[in-house]
Image: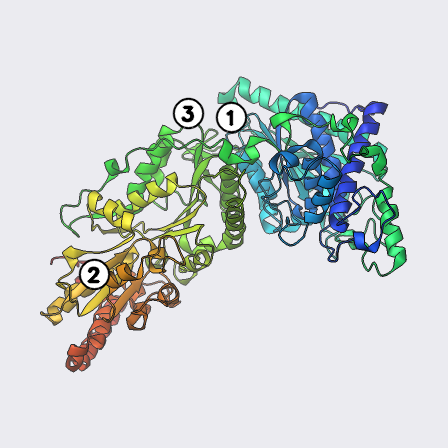
Amino acid sequence: MNKPVKRPAISSPLSADLLAKTDAYWRAANYLSVGQIYLQDNPLLETPLKREHIKARLLGHWGTTTGLNFIYVHLNRLIRNYDLNMIYVIGPGHGGPGLVAHTYLEGSYTERYPNIERSRSGLRRLFRQFSWPYGIPSHVAPETPGSIHEGGELGYSLLHAYGAAFDNPDLIVACIIGDGEAETGPLAASWHSNKFLNPARDGAVLPILHFNGFKIANPTVLARISRNELIDLIRGYGYEPHFVEGDVPAEVHQSLAGALDIVIAEIHDIQRVARAAPDKVRRPRWPMIVFKTPKGWTGPKFVDGKPVEGTWRAHQVPITDFENPQHLQQLEAWMRSYRPQELFDDKGKFREEFAALAPTGHRRMGMNPHANGGELLQPLAMPHFQDYAVAVFKPGSVEAESTRILGQFLRDVMKLNLDKGNFRLFGPDETASNRLEAVYEVSGKEWMAAFEAVDTDLSVDGRVMEVLSEHLCEGWLEGYLLTGRHGLFSCYEAFAHIIDSMVNQHAKWLKTIKTIPWRMPIASLNYLLTSHVWRQDHNGFSHQDPGFIDHLANKKASIVRIYLPPDANCLLSVADHCLRSRNYINLIIAGKQPEWQWLDIEAAVRHCTRGVGTWEWASNDDDDPDVVMACAGDVPTLETLAAVTLLRAYVPDIRIRVVNVVDLMVLQPPSEHPHGLEDRDFDELFTADKPVIFAFHGYPAMIHKLTYRRRNHDNMHVRGYRDEGTTTTPFDMVVLNNLDRYQLALDAITRIPRLSDQVQKATERYWTTMERHKLYVSEHGEDMPEVRDWQWNL
């Protein structure tokens, strides 16, 4: 591990004049932060503070904000002194008033929101809008210029920072991590991201561990361990800590300025050495800062006789209940302690002598284009997906592994975009398992830790990001997308739930940015879930769960797309569409095992474009079906088609329509989802009054949820996953969940009125078959030949 060159700290890197101005800038940010939490009027305290000047509802967080303000001021100095390209990621996102204050002081906020002028009236609007109905949230939300990280849910800041730094060689991401946030599992794992950052081609992440010692009501763990234990922990993660601590502002200003000068020199040394000899690059020990100041610093030290500054009581709003006149006096004294008349002129504008400390143009963190990734987004160079198609001359005549075919397509997506360095594949140690290993022909797996002879496909220049943490993969990809690049996340279906909460936050981000004119569209978040529920017979029940569909289907229709391609050619068409899309969360579910292929590439494109359709080659309904056999998902499609062959053998004159669904959301009415079918089109496919036997990949209730408004909903009978699973054969998995071909055939006979006299015979035949199946798999450990060797032959 390369060690950075140590430099002695300069005891007083700030001149007396610069120290005074830096402190004034910090005071201005603190003043604006307090004002946002409390005031709806009298923004400059030009008259004595009155109750009517204070908001009726006091919302927001004070405790972390002043520390964030302190750091931001010093990062501004660093950017100006070294002409840095820098963005911030704020883990304690509830320090939102501070980041809003800084972007206002640097001018970014007014450029994005011209109605918030740099004047008295602009200050009033700035204060009034914070945590106000139809105003702005209290966190570092999408509305905040320069933000790529909301921070309302803790744990993901360092992941987003590293994702932003990948393939951005000139970018430095300053990531402020709260000591409470550091207790979360994702954050604890995310320190290992430094094993995947190549200083020869990537940017740098500067972690700043912001210690204020307390959470909402408890001390933080890291604040209550010894200094030596903390140092050992940080160094064990591969970082070199620089400590800055204190509660005397002038001393802390000098200390932080000196530490930042050292740290930026160390980062530049690491990058210079790596870029001079990229073929010999080794993992460095990256610097970081531990910044320790009191919680609620500069706020009230006591309220009602109880200590506040430096305690958990400073976490949110320190002074409340303004029916108490002493509280009103205390708030006014607190705000006047920042000396606002020194900071703002008589028109309410931040005085130029202090404003000049901020960077200008795109060097301002609030206006850096990397924090509005759509400004930098370049379309992927895409191969023609038709070139990778499986030749299907007759439905069901050839087998293929769908994801292996997709892997060849992704390989060339990666190849065509190597020069741009804007596409990566993410997955938790499963790329080869999921049959996508063709990408290794172009790029290996990124790896900056030690190499051993037994290793395969590891590379310091890899573009495949594998680490056994769904949190890391998801967070890296989100940071990568938010800063203007493209990617795809491949995962075992059952374990996508690990990042349920992360995708929640990204969905909220996407929903919000659609309403913000200056936020440019970004590449979609694309999931490929494979090793899915119906082909996890070897791993058993622990690996069987299709519920990620339900989780995403609950999100806004303007954001979510869910695709269930039945074969490899449909998967190619869907994947091409998803990689080209913007501002969506695309979920693709496709199996990796050899399966029969149904559609040639032209038919697949037509089918996927519409999202649903009748498979005429499998139907014989002559526009008057006895039953509609519907399916969504590769295994349900197989079982449905097998059921069709059974039914046509059992009942030679039966009229069957086969409907396959690729785009799950077409089942909703157009009033609920933009992909939804009009009622007349839905009825044309599913009929208005005939039984529909629907074989679904996931939980049956989802189909009912999507179709409950449809005229024929009462005739829909859905089979899907019922939380029945074990280590068993592939066919026994569908049997356990009543999704098998024999059950589907029985369902059809039971629900076709004219076949009522055949129900008893069909039922007896079904149970005889099930008994035969159970005896066979128990004896032979594999499925019956009639199942194992089945092939479409109609």
Left or right side of 253 for 615: left
Give the camera-side residue of 673 and 233: 673
Left or right side of 123 for 467: left
Q: Residues within 10 Å of mark 2 (few under 14, many from 20)?
A: many
**Which mark is first along the chain, 1 or 2?**
1
Observer-side mark, 3 or 2, equals: 2
Q: Quadrant of residue 549?
A: bottom left
> Which element type, helix, strand or loop, lies under badge 3?
loop
Give the camera-side residue of 677 and 275: 677
At which x and y percent is residue 86? 62, 30
Give the camera-side residue of 470 and 32: 32
Give the camera-side residue of 593 and 503: 503
Left or right side of 427 for 318: right
Quarter of the image where the C terminus is located:
bottom left
Quarter of the image where the N terminus is located:
top right
The relative height of residue 611 versus residue 149 in the rendered view (above or below) is below
Circle 3: residue type: Asp
**Which color scheme is applied?**
rainbow
Q: How many marks?
A: 3
Q: CA distance from mark 3 to mark 1?
A: 12 Å
Q: CA distance from mark 3 to mark 2?
A: 46 Å
Which residue is tagged 3? 419
Which residue is tagged 2? 658
The relative height of residue 698 versus residue 374 in the rendered view (above or below) is below
Circle 2: residue type: Val
Which residue is tagged 1? 201
> Which element type, helix, strand or loop, lies under badge 1?
loop
The relative height of residue 438 versus residue 396 in the rendered view (above or below) is above
Left or right side of 533 for 233: right
**Which mark is first along the chain, 1 or 3?**
1
Q: CA distance from mark 2 to mark 1?
A: 52 Å
Observer-side mark, 3 or 1, equals: 3
